[in-house]
């Protein structure tokens, strides 16, 4: 229970702060957009970059972790993708449905939660989950959509569009550059390290407040079966599959295993909503699923945090 109070409660309290700020009109839609851009393009990339420059490369080659987390994503994506084939026959819509069920809010919510629960040692695995979510999963969904949109599907054209989309994603570029720096074996100059440290320190609170602002502006219409299917896949199926893979199939240190499970159990991030909006699809189901999963995660994530705190991490 102490872990819930010290780790999970502050995270949800910051989300509530953003929600109240929007409801009380302290911050409006313009502030939501500006704060979101600040997090995506400045503070969170700085945090991810610095985290990767400080990793011990000999201690981070846990391919079992990657396989376990990716396996949970794949199983959940496939289940939602196939489950939506009757109501959403178009490949584009089914791809967005699959993405929504498996797209964890890793950068905005997962990293702050891991730092609060596990400390700085969890930044490396948490960053890897962000990479898998923001690059591999997101890129795969974009590839399916672009393939569906082309009258004469071309693998080369699709790959070029996906590549350009990923190259413009700072949440992918920043940790990759940090990892490249880590390979040099050099430390960041003290002034530069202090700069990215200060900039990255604002990522967690700003990201969580941004989630609250977004949720306050999300439609609250009744949830249909499509929304509940996405929420169940994200909060129940994905962490369950990941837990089986992390603890019974692939070897890895306990903290990495628990980090994989915790990151898999996070609510749906805003990526699917942005993708649906970008391609002109109906984004109401994804926006409601984000809202419902985030509210429900107050209970599910808190219970998981309490469960983790009762088990040794070494």
Image (cartoon, grey):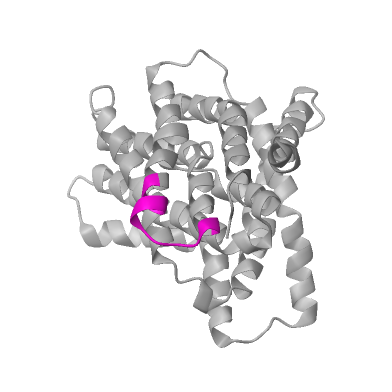
Total tally of numbered discs in the picture? 0
Quick one: quadrant of the N terminus?
Answer: top right
Q: Is residue 106 visible?
A: yes
Q: At which x and y percent is residue 314?
A: 57, 60
- The residue sitting at 31% across, 42% down in the picture is 75
Q: Which residues are magenta?
A: 244-255
Residue 248 magenta: yes
Q: At which x and y percent is residue 39?
A: 67, 51
In-front residue for pair 212/102: 102
Q: Residue furthest left?
A: 152
Residue 3 magenta: no
Which SS type dominates the magenta stretch? helix
In-front residue for pair 186/314: 314
Against 70, residue 267 (above or below) is above
Q: Is residue 282 visible?
A: no
Left or right relative to 159: residue 9: right
Which quadrant of the view contains residue 255? bottom right
Which quadrant of the view contains residue 115? bottom right
């Amino acid at each position: 229970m102490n872990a819930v109070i010290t780790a999970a409660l502050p995270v949800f309290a910051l989300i509530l702060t953003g929600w109240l700020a929007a409801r009380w009109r302290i911050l409006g839609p313009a502030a939501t957009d500006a704060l979101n851009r600040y997090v995506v393009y400045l503070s969170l990339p700085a945090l991810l970059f610095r985290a990767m420059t400080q990793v011990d490369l000999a201690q981070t080659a846990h391919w079992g972790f990657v396989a376990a987390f990716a396996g949970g994503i794949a199983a959940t994506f496939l289940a939602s993708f196939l489950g939506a084939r009757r109501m959403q026959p178009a490949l584009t819509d089914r791809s967005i449905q699959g993405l929504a069920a498996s797209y964890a809010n890793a950068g905005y919510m997962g990293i702050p939660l891991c730092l609060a629960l596990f400390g700085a040692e969890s930044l490396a695995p948490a960053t890897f989950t962000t990479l898998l979510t923001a690059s591999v999963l997101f890129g795969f969904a974009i590839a399916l959509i672009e393939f569906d949109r082309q009258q004469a599907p071309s693998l080369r054209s699709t790959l070029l569009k996906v590549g350009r989309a990923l190259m413009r994603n700072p949440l992918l570029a920043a940790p990759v550059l940090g990892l490249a720096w880590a390979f040099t074996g050099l430390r960041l100059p003290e002034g530069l390290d202090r700069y990215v440290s200060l900039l990255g320190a604002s990522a967690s609170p700003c990201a969580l407040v941004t989630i609250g602002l977004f949720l306050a502006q999300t439609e609250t219409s009744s949830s249909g079966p499509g929304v509940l299917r996405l929420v169940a896949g994200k909060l129940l199926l994905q962490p369950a599959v990941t837990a089986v893979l992390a603890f019974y199939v692939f070897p890895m240190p306990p903290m990495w295993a628990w980090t994989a499970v915790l990151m898999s159990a996070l609510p749906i991030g805003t990526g699917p909503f942005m993708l649906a909006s970008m391609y002109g699809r109906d984004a109401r189901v994804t926006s409601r699923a984000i809202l419902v999963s985030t509210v429900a995660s107050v209970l599910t994530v808190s219970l998981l945090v309490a469960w983790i705190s009762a088990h040794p991490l070494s």
